[in-house]
Image (spheres, rainbow, N blue to C red):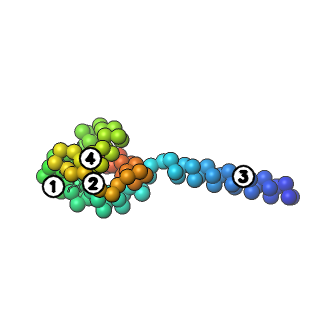
Amino acid sequence: MTKTIRTLTMLAVAVSMTGAAQLAQAASATAGQPIYNAKCKMCHAADGAGTLPKAKASPLGGAAAQAKSDADLKKAITDGTGTMKPVAGIAGADLDNVVAFLRTLKK
Ligand code: HEC
Protein backbone atom coordinates (compact mmCIF):
# COMPACT_ATOMS: atom_id res chain seq x y z
CA MET A 1 0.00 0.00 0.00
CA THR A 2 2.70 2.50 1.03
CA LYS A 3 4.66 1.44 -2.01
CA THR A 4 1.69 2.09 -4.31
CA ILE A 5 1.18 5.55 -2.86
CA ARG A 6 4.87 6.36 -3.28
CA THR A 7 4.82 5.16 -6.89
CA LEU A 8 1.69 7.18 -7.63
CA THR A 9 3.20 10.30 -6.03
CA MET A 10 6.36 9.96 -8.08
CA LEU A 11 4.30 9.47 -11.20
CA ALA A 12 2.26 12.58 -10.47
CA VAL A 13 5.42 14.63 -9.90
CA ALA A 14 6.94 13.34 -13.14
CA VAL A 15 3.80 14.18 -15.12
CA SER A 16 3.51 17.69 -13.67
CA MET A 17 7.20 18.36 -14.38
CA THR A 18 6.81 17.29 -18.00
CA GLY A 19 3.77 19.54 -18.31
CA ALA A 20 5.65 22.55 -16.96
CA ALA A 21 8.60 21.94 -19.28
CA GLN A 22 6.28 21.84 -22.28
CA LEU A 23 4.55 25.03 -21.22
CA ALA A 24 7.88 26.82 -20.91
CA GLN A 25 8.97 25.74 -24.38
CA ALA A 26 6.00 25.75 -26.72
CA ALA A 27 4.98 29.14 -28.05
CA SER A 28 1.26 29.63 -27.55
CA ALA A 29 -1.02 31.21 -30.13
CA THR A 30 -3.68 31.43 -27.40
CA ALA A 31 -1.34 33.56 -25.29
CA GLY A 32 -0.30 35.57 -28.37
CA GLN A 33 -3.81 36.59 -29.42
CA PRO A 34 -4.49 39.12 -26.62
CA ILE A 35 -1.08 40.73 -27.30
CA TYR A 36 -1.91 40.91 -31.02
CA ASN A 37 -5.29 42.43 -30.20
CA ALA A 38 -3.67 45.07 -27.99
CA LYS A 39 -0.66 45.94 -30.18
CA CYS A 40 -1.32 44.97 -33.81
CA LYS A 41 -5.05 44.71 -34.47
CA MET A 42 -5.64 48.46 -34.88
CA CYS A 43 -3.52 48.43 -38.05
CA HIS A 44 -3.70 44.79 -39.14
CA ALA A 45 -7.35 43.89 -38.24
CA ALA A 46 -8.36 40.83 -36.21
CA ASP A 47 -7.71 38.48 -39.13
CA GLY A 48 -4.50 40.15 -40.35
CA ALA A 49 -6.17 41.53 -43.50
CA GLY A 50 -5.21 45.09 -42.51
CA THR A 51 -7.09 48.29 -41.75
CA LEU A 52 -4.47 50.75 -43.08
CA PRO A 53 -3.93 50.81 -46.86
CA LYS A 54 -0.26 49.78 -46.54
CA ALA A 55 -1.10 46.99 -44.10
CA LYS A 56 -3.87 45.80 -46.46
CA ALA A 57 -1.22 45.49 -49.17
CA SER A 58 0.74 43.11 -46.88
CA PRO A 59 -1.90 40.87 -45.27
CA LEU A 60 -0.38 38.91 -42.40
CA GLY A 61 -2.11 35.70 -43.50
CA GLY A 62 -0.86 36.13 -47.07
CA ALA A 63 1.89 34.18 -48.81
CA ALA A 64 4.58 36.88 -48.46
CA ALA A 65 4.20 37.31 -44.71
CA GLN A 66 3.78 33.58 -44.04
CA ALA A 67 6.89 32.78 -46.12
CA LYS A 68 8.96 34.74 -43.59
CA SER A 69 10.85 32.82 -40.93
CA ASP A 70 9.90 33.24 -37.26
CA ALA A 71 13.12 35.24 -36.84
CA ASP A 72 12.16 37.61 -39.67
CA LEU A 73 8.65 38.09 -38.27
CA LYS A 74 10.13 38.93 -34.85
CA LYS A 75 12.53 41.37 -36.50
CA ALA A 76 9.61 43.07 -38.30
CA ILE A 77 7.92 43.53 -34.91
CA THR A 78 10.93 44.73 -32.91
CA ASP A 79 12.73 46.70 -35.66
CA GLY A 80 9.81 47.69 -37.89
CA THR A 81 9.43 46.91 -41.58
CA GLY A 82 8.84 49.34 -44.45
CA THR A 83 6.49 52.04 -43.14
CA MET A 84 5.67 50.06 -39.98
CA LYS A 85 7.44 51.46 -36.93
CA PRO A 86 8.97 49.13 -34.33
CA VAL A 87 6.39 47.92 -31.81
CA ALA A 88 7.56 48.63 -28.25
CA GLY A 89 7.01 46.42 -25.25
CA ILE A 90 7.10 42.95 -26.80
CA ALA A 91 10.02 40.64 -26.01
CA GLY A 92 10.90 37.09 -25.03
CA ALA A 93 8.01 34.68 -24.71
CA ASP A 94 5.50 37.38 -25.74
CA LEU A 95 7.30 37.68 -29.07
CA ASP A 96 7.23 33.89 -29.58
CA ASN A 97 3.54 33.80 -28.70
CA VAL A 98 2.61 36.64 -31.10
CA VAL A 99 4.48 34.84 -33.90
CA ALA A 100 2.63 31.61 -33.02
CA PHE A 101 -0.62 33.59 -33.34
CA LEU A 102 0.48 35.05 -36.72
CA ARG A 103 0.87 31.46 -37.99
CA THR A 104 -2.82 30.82 -37.24
CA LEU A 105 -3.76 33.67 -39.64
CA LYS A 106 -2.41 31.77 -42.67
CA LYS A 107 -4.98 31.74 -45.47
C1 HEC B 1 0.60 51.67 -36.51
C2 HEC B 1 0.17 50.59 -37.36
C3 HEC B 1 0.81 49.22 -37.17
C4 HEC B 1 0.95 48.51 -36.00
C5 HEC B 1 0.56 48.90 -34.60
C6 HEC B 1 1.56 47.23 -36.37
N1 HEC B 1 1.78 47.19 -37.72
FE1 HEC B 1 2.65 45.66 -38.76
N2 HEC B 1 2.57 46.76 -40.46
C7 HEC B 1 1.96 48.00 -40.59
C8 HEC B 1 2.09 48.46 -41.97
C9 HEC B 1 1.55 49.77 -42.52
C10 HEC B 1 2.79 47.44 -42.66
C11 HEC B 1 3.22 47.43 -44.12
C12 HEC B 1 4.60 48.09 -44.17
C13 HEC B 1 5.06 48.39 -45.57
O1 HEC B 1 4.92 47.50 -46.41
O2 HEC B 1 5.60 49.47 -45.79
C14 HEC B 1 3.09 46.39 -41.68
C15 HEC B 1 3.77 45.21 -41.97
C16 HEC B 1 3.91 44.16 -41.10
C17 HEC B 1 4.55 42.90 -41.42
C18 HEC B 1 5.20 42.52 -42.75
C19 HEC B 1 4.17 41.83 -43.64
C20 HEC B 1 4.76 41.37 -44.95
O3 HEC B 1 4.01 40.78 -45.76
O4 HEC B 1 5.94 41.59 -45.19
C21 HEC B 1 4.45 42.11 -40.31
C22 HEC B 1 4.94 40.67 -40.15
C23 HEC B 1 3.76 42.88 -39.30
N3 HEC B 1 3.46 44.12 -39.80
C24 HEC B 1 3.43 42.41 -38.05
C25 HEC B 1 2.93 43.20 -37.02
C26 HEC B 1 2.69 42.72 -35.69
C27 HEC B 1 2.85 41.29 -35.23
C28 HEC B 1 2.28 43.79 -34.96
C29 HEC B 1 1.98 43.84 -33.49
C30 HEC B 1 3.00 43.33 -32.60
C31 HEC B 1 2.22 44.93 -35.86
N4 HEC B 1 2.62 44.52 -37.10
C32 HEC B 1 1.82 46.21 -35.48
C33 HEC B 1 1.35 48.72 -39.59
C34 HEC B 1 1.34 48.38 -38.25
Of the two numbered discs 3 and 2 on the same chain, state the one appearing first in sequence.
3
Camera-side residue of 22 and 78:
78
Up-down: is 68 above or below 99?
above
Q: Amino acid at mark 3?
A: Leu
Q: Residues within 10 Å of mark 1 (few under 14, many from 20)?
A: few
Name the residue that disc number 1 marks.
Answer: 52
Name the residue that disc number 3 marks.
Answer: 11
Q: Amino acid at mark 2?
A: Val
Of the two numbered discs 2 and 1 on the same chain, state the one appearing first in sequence.
1
Of the two numbered discs 4 and 3 on the same chain, state the one appearing first in sequence.
3
Q: Could you say where residue 91 lies in the image, as x and y percent from the top left?
A: 37, 52
Q: Secondary structure at mark 4?
A: helix
* Residue at 57%, 53% in the rendered image: 20
Quote the CA–CA distance across marks 3 and 2.
Answer: 44 Å
Of the two numbered discs 1 and 3 on the same chain, state the one appearing first in sequence.
3
* Residue at 13%, 52% in the rendered image: 53
Name which quarter of the figure residue 30 lies in.
bottom left
Residue 104 in view of the camera: no
Mark 2 vs mark 1, foreground winner is: 2
Quadrant location of the C terminus?
top left
